[in-house]
Structures are given as structure tokens and as C-alpha cells.
Image (tube, rainbow, N blue to C red):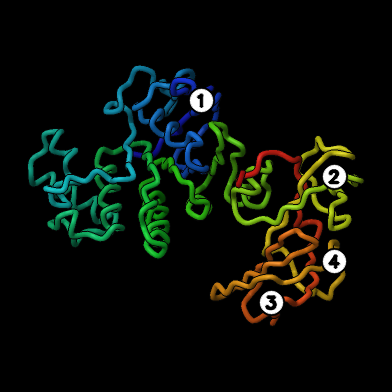
């Protein structure tokens, strides 16, 4: 069954005196892979449990496919949830785990086996049907949990950090597999993660959260390239951050005065005026070292550390007491620690935002 849209309307929830979610309104489109991204304790898992029906919100409405979920228990909602611990039945075989929902419906053993094998084939596990969960790899167990969740034919699949315990290579493999499963099934996926790489790689839409509130909703490209707040700019990806104040504005471009001199960038908000205290952000991969071409912003620093990361190298510079990172292809430059280098970047690659809470505060 194709996925349905999910509407959250003025959702708030408090645990005693702690507000976990505050006045949240958003829509998850049907057949969308939607991620809530944020640090631990920001309220994203609470939202997932509210959608599933395990928590009744203090205030607000949850609509799935246009139907109000108020008073509808979890087992009667068109949702299925995959928890971090997967909760597979250890004494059942793989196919029996997947077929559990069919047994509850009273299907014959032959029919249950056939449907379970169809679902296992969908998640590329057709050869492990008779194995026990403990005989499988971590990635295989997660795919079993997905197949079992799909067995109830949900319109919305809720995933609570299902890849958090996996090593890097397996996590990268599962990211690709999860995205493909979502495309094949056309079920609406709502995914919870604190890992920006997961969210950027898989999602159609991302909601970045902190302290119970959504800071920005957008595509991965919008979230990464056009953050709207200081928090999003610092939480999603690496960013060099420079404090300053606006000295001039020319259309959507601003000049700021900083401890490193005057720098220019794109204004991230139309509300900023001359004299405002701001931060200028520029991604490490947008910076150039010892570039010869004419460029908008150029400052000189000293290389204090270099990190080799295979195809790329990360160069850390000290510029008048400020720390900068530059990422460039391995072999492009040959610097020694202690060397001076010119760091430069284009105005169009720098973003000026009002000062506010940082993603690393």
C-alpha cells in the first residue's frame, strides 16, 4: 500500500516540567523519506512515539492520510516502528519473525511462509529464512526488522536510529539499502537520527531540531548549502565561523568587519541591517590555499596541523588566533606544519547569519 502523508499540527509535549516538543507544525508528504535530525534530547524520538501512538501529546493533532489519530491505539494506526534494539524474537527463525503478523491474522503456515519469503526477497535476504537472528550480521538483522515491519503493510514506517550501533562500512551499506527499500515499497519513511551523514544521504526532506523546536525544513542540499540559522550552519557539516558586525549591504551581499579584517559574503536573512552582530560561515571545501586568481576574501595564516584522509587532506590554520579548516584533494598542495599560507574564498561561498545559539554549544 502506498505511503500516506503525516500532518503534525501544533504538537507540544512536556515530561513534568521539561518541554520535549514545542508547538510543532509540519507535513510529511506521502511516499517521502523524511528525517528528523538533531542532537540527543532535542525531542525527535518523542515526535516518533507521538506519531506511533505510544505517547499522547500534551497538545495538538496527528493526522495520517487526513485522518485524526486521536484516541486510536498504536496497533490500529497505519504505522510500524523499528526500534534501536530491533526487538527480534530470538527463539524464532528469520521467516517466523517476519511472518508473526500473518500468524496473528490467522493465516495458514504455508501462506505465512510464502509471504515471509516474498518480503525477505524484497530486502535481499531470501537465503537466510531458516536461520536464527543470532546467526545473522548486524546489517542482516536490521533488514529482517524492516521486512517484519513491512509485513503489517504500514502506510508509514517509523525508524528510531536503527543504524546507530553499526560500524562505518556497514552503516554506509545500510544507508543505500534503506533508501532503495523505501523507493521500491513507496511507504512513507520517517527516520530519526543524530547523524548528519545519514540524513543527508537518504532523505527527501530533513527537519533539523534543537530543544524541542524545528530550526529548518528542507532538502539535503538546502539544509547544507543554505542554512537559515546559526544552529543549522554549525550542526550540519563542518563550517569555519567568524564573528563580526555588518558595515555595508549591497543587495544580498554584505561586508563585515572582523578581527581578521573586512570580509564579504551572502546575507542569509533579509532582516539584517548595518551594525548587526553576525557570524560569517564558509565551508572548509570552499576555501582555497595560495590561490593565484583574484578572489573576494584573502587572509594569511599558519598551518598548525594536517590530517590525511585518503582522497582528501584537512589543513588546520591559525589566523590571528582564529582556527580555520581547509579541505583539498590529496596531492594538490605540499605544505609543512609551520608554513604560512594564504587562505581565500569567494563571497558567494560565504554566508552571513545573525548571531545565535550554535550547534556545538
> Which of the marked residues, 3 or 1, is nearer the chain's N terminus?
1
Camera-near label (4 vs 3) is: 3
Mark 4 lies on a secondary structure that is: loop
Q: Position of residue 81 (x, y in %)?
A: 33, 38
> Which of the marked residues, 2 or 3, is nearer the chain's N terminus?
2
Q: CA distance from mark 1 to mark 4?
A: 47 Å
- Point 49% across, 25% down: residue: 18
- Point 17% across, 52% down: residue: 94
- Point 87% across, 44% down: residue: 246
Observer-nearest of 195 and 129: 195
| Residue matched to label 4 | 295
> Which of the marked residues, 4 or 3, is nearer the chain's N terminus?
4
Q: Which mark is residue 337?
A: 3
Q: Position of residue 342 (x, y in %)?
A: 80, 71
Q: CA distance from mark 3 to mark 1?
A: 48 Å
Observer-nearest of 256 and 180: 256
| Residue matched to label 1 | 19
Q: CA distance from mark 2 to mark 3?
A: 32 Å
Q: Residues within 10 Å of mark 1 (few under 14, many from 20)?
A: some
Q: CA distance from mark 4 to mark 3?
A: 25 Å
Q: Is residue 96 left or right of residue 148?
A: left
Q: Are marks 1 and 4 in contact (CB under 8 Å)?
A: no
> Which of the marked residues, 2 or 1, is nearer the chain's N terminus?
1
Q: CA distance from mark 2 to mark 4?
A: 21 Å
For this orientation, the residue located farthest to the left is 109
Q: Is residue 360 left or right of residue 243?
A: left
> Which of the marked residues, 1 or 4, is nearer the chain's N terminus?
1
| Residue matched to label 2 | 245
Amino acid at each position: 500500500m502506498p505511503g500516506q502523508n503525516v500532518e503534525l499540527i501544533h504538537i507540544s509535549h512536556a515530561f513534568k516540567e521539561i518541554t520535549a516538543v514545542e508547538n510543532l507544525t509540519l507535513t510529511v508528504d506521502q511516499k517521502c523519506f523524511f528525517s528528523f535530525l538533531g542532537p540527543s534530547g532535542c525531542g525527535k524520538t518523542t515526535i516518533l512515539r507521538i506519531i506511533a501512538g505510544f505517547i499522547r501529546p500534551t497538545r495538538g493533532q496527528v493526522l495520517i492520510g487526513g485522518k485524526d489519530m486521536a484516541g486510536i491505539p498504536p496497533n490500529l494506526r497505519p504505522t510500524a516502528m523499528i526500534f534501536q534494539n530491533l526487538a527480534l524474537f530470538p527463539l524464532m527463525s528469520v521467516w517466523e519473525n517476519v511472518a508473526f503478523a500473518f500468524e496473528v491474522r490467522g493465516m495458514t503456515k504455508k501462506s505465512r511462509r510464502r509471504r515471509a519469503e516474498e518480503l525477505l526477497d524484497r530486502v535481499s535476504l531470501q537465503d537466510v529464512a531458516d536461520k536464527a537472528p543470532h546467526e545473522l550480521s548486524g546489517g542482516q538483522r536490521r533488514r529482517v526488522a524492516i521486512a517484519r515491519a513491512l509485513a503489517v503493510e504500514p502506510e508509514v514506517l517509523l525508524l528510531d536510529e536503527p543504524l546507530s550501533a553499526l560500524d562505518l562500512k556497514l552503516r554506509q551499506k545500510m544507508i543505500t539499502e534503506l533508501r532503495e527499500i523505501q523507493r521500491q515499497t513507496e511507504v512513507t519513511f520517517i527516520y530519526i537520527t543524530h547523524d548528519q551523514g545519514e540524513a543527508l544521504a537518504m532523505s527527501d526532506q530533513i527537519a533539523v531540531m534543537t530543544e524541542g523546536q524545528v530550526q529548518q525544513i528542507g532538502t539535503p542540499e538546502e539544509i547544507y548549502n543554505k542554512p537559515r540559522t546559526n544552529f543549522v550552519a554549525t550542526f550540519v557539516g563542518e563550517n569555519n565561523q567568524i564573528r563580526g558586525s555588518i558595515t555595508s549591504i549591497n543587495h544580498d551581499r554584505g561586508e563585515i568587519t572582523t578581527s581578521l579584517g573586512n570580509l564579504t559574503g551572502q546575507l542569509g536573512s533579509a532582516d539584517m541591517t548595518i551594525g548587526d552582530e553576525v557570524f560569517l560561515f564558509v565551508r572548509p571545501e570552499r576555501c582555497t590555499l595560495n590561490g593565484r586568481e583574484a578572489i573576494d576574501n584573502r587572509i594569511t595564516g599558519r598551518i598548525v596541523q594536517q590530517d590525511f584522509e585518503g582522497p582528501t587532506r584537512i589543513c588546520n590554520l591559525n589566523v590571528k588566533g582564529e582556527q580555520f579548516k581547509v579541505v583539498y584533494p590529496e596531492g594538490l598542495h605540499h605544505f609543512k606544519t609551520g608554513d604560512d599560507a594564504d587562505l581565500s574564498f569567494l563571497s558567494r561561498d560565504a554566508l552571513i547569519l545573525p548571531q545565535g545559539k550554535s550547534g556545538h554549544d
